Image: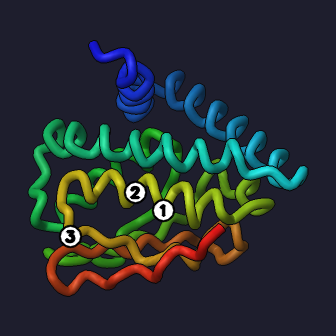
Amino acid sequence: MNPARAPLGLAYRLFVRAERDPLARGLVVRMVQRWFSVLVAERARGGRRLFELSRRWLTRFGAYRGPRLAQALGVDPNHMGDLARIQDFEDRAFSVEGHWTARERSSATKCETACPFAEIAAAMPELCTELVHGLETATFRAINPTYRLVPLERLLSKRDGHCEFSHHIGAHAPTPPARPAL
């Protein structure tokens, strides 16, 4: 095994186990809550270093897990409604609850109504708008390069009542706005 990929493989195995094992799920949720708390504390002191490291690691993790999940779940990479099963898997692993309002060939929209990270993320919505958005984007683009996730604007962490994930693939997928320079 490539030592540089070992942490990705270990994290992936724990993530997969959490989807079916309540004890592993509880561990994963507590780990992410603690990690997010550290990022919030860093931001309160004016820092961004751990946040940027987290962004890079989650992008790598998303690219690592995407093809593996697609293969394990047998999803059609050219049907967003079928690719949506990956978010269902992820939501079970992280104890997130929600429902699909649309699942079509080129788009799918999910409203998440309960999330164990929303309270912590309320202090720093960028945990959702940047880190979670980046993880989802990297995961799905590793499966279908035309994938786009609309910027996350409706969020539990912003007290909106639900998070809305609007996924798109194909030639008419919306182009995300350019990221502001830091």
Vertical placement of residue 18 versus 159, above or below: above
Q: Secondary structure at mark 2?
A: helix
- Tag 1 residue: 133
Residue shown at the point (52%, 51%) measured from the top left: 96
Q: Residue at x 35, y 54 (%)?
A: 138
Q: Which quarter of the figure is the C terminus placed in?
A: bottom right
Seen in the picture, residue 161 relative to 31 is either above or below; the reply is below
Q: Which residue is mark 2?
A: 136
Give the CA distance from mark 3 to mark 1: 16 Å
Q: Say what secondary structure mark 1 lies in.
A: helix
Tell me the amino acid under the disc marked 3: Thr
Between 64 and 166, which is closer to the camera in this rendering?
64
Label for residue 146?
3
In this view of the protein, which residue sits in the foreground, 1 or 27? 1
Residue type pointed to by label 2: Glu
Foreground pick, 98 / 145: 145
Residue 117: percent from left, percent from top: 65, 50
Q: Earlier in the sequence, mark 3 or mark 2?
A: 2
Amino acid type shown at disc 1 = His
Q: Residue at 25%, 81% (x, y): give it.
A: 173
Q: Position of residue 163 (x, y in %)?
A: 54, 70
